[in-house]
Amino acid sequence: MKNILLLFFLSFSFNLFSQNAHEYHVKIKGMEDTVIYFGHHYGDKQYVIDTIPTNAKGEAVIAGSDTLKGGIYLVVMPKLKNKYFELIINEPTFSLETDTTDFTVYMKFKGSPENTAFYDDLNFINTKRKEADPLKEKLKTLEAESEEAKKLKDELIAINKSVEDERKSIQTKHPELFYAKFLKALEDVKIPEAPVNADGTKDSLFAYKYVRAHFFDNIDFGDDRFLRSSLLQAKIKKYLDSYVPRIPDSISVAVDYIINKANANTEVFKFAVVTLLNDYANSKIMGMDAVYVHMVDTYYKTGKAYWADATALYKITSQADKIRPTLIGKIAPNILLQDSSGHDIPLYSVKKKYTVILFWDVDCSHCKKEMPKLELAYPQIKERNAEVYAVYSQEEWDKWKKQLKEKNYPWINVGNVSMKSNFQSQYYVDQTPMIFIVNDKKEIIAKKIAVEQIVEVLDNYNAIEKQQK
């Protein structure tokens, strides 16, 4: 009897500890005897984490011994050119059934209040969209102030109100659901009436200021489930694009503001820092490298980027230190280079109001396209009291001198003939052509711009100077 009880206990223990931490039964009509991919959102990207076969009935089991982190996941069908439907993972097990002819309409769940609420809402939205679309099309054909147009607008407002009410109802009835939090995070901030000043006026910028101050009120930065959706990153992007001036100092302050909120959760903090660092490392907007340097100094050099190993840390901080000397507003490093006759021509010897510093190479394919454009633009550059200081970036002097003789470039042409300059590191010349513009104080006012932008930059800077006088 003891042996029987022992065997029973061992068997029970084995079954107990071999159970999957997550197990989802999926049945998809139209996906028989094939495979599906299972993955999740992570910011604006999607990642596949498993490939699962389906049987002759289109059934598959998504299971594993690990607990899946909550968020919005994807079931992808390679057979259907990677069409997919989404699931909320916030429960260890459930089952679903759907049809490839319309995933949303035919979706049914068992054991998943999260996804039942999710798909009930999607179907409700689709129904309301079908009601609204013909009204919108009809509205386009009407006079804006006609009675019929006003009637249609009222109908559209009512439809929109019904959607808002339905989503509010989900949040009220099911506050425990992640989908309720997700719907709340989707909502725009409600702007109150602007207060009346003592003189009876209202601040015309009140709405802008209010939204900027309360933009993130509806999203919980402490909930890392938002990482496995596109929503958090989209909101951060919208805030930075729409409510922050495109000035490096302003953006740096805004980035710190966002990251401070993200500090509510270690994974959200990591996501915010890494994502924003990459955005500004690769930004095409002039001057945004200052935001990159600020972030490296604030989060990587201080040890706050706990995930960065020594190799990554060295790479990131070294990059920032290379960029630092030539940020917009910095004094351009002086460089002592020589012309084709070997005479010294320091950068600071140029006494024009503006100096266009060009780093180029004879064999660079892009330079071959840009140099003729510079020749055409040069008269306009000269008219604006500017000079071009063209630095040959290589050491094949015969090639360089031959090109100068053939082309007879009218600007200042120099190279590191003496082999004593370290201009590549002073200006971090990692590609050619590369253009900087400095003013008469040798402050960098523009960098990494195209030849076509030189005259425009000079005109804009002149206009700003006139306004400041």
Image (spheres, grey):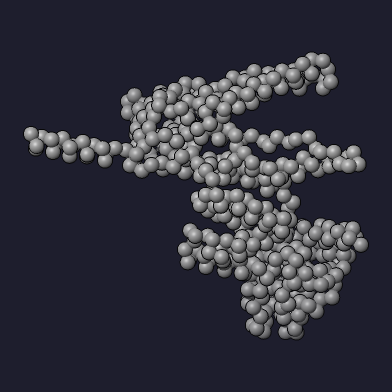
**For this rendering, which residue is in front, 92 or 134?**
92
Name the residue rendered at 38%, 35% in the picture: 92
Would residue 6 appear left or right of 182 to someone viewing this image? left
**For this rendering, which residue is in front, 433 or 133?**
133
Quadrant of the image containing the N terminus: top left
Name the residue rendered at 36%, 43% in the picture: 66
Mark yes or no: residue 10 visible.
yes
| Number of numbered discs overlaid on the protein picture | 0
Mark yes or no: residue 62 visible.
no
Would residue 7 appear left or right of 16 to someone viewing this image? left
Residue 136 on image: x %, y %: 71, 22
Up-down relation of residue 152 to residue 96 (above or below): above
Name the residue rendered at 81%, 76% in the picture: 350
**For this rendering, which residue is in front, 432 or 246?**
246
**For this rendering, which residue is in front, 162 or 199?**
199
Would residue 184 appear left or right of 76 to someone viewing this image? right
Quadrant of the image containing the C terminus: bottom right
Residue 94 on image: x %, y %: 39, 29
Would residue 380 appear left or right of 209 to someone viewing this image? right
* Quadrant of res 437: bottom right
Residue 106 on image: x %, y %: 47, 21
Residue 38 on image: x %, y %: 42, 38
Name the residue rendered at 61%, 65% in the picture: 297
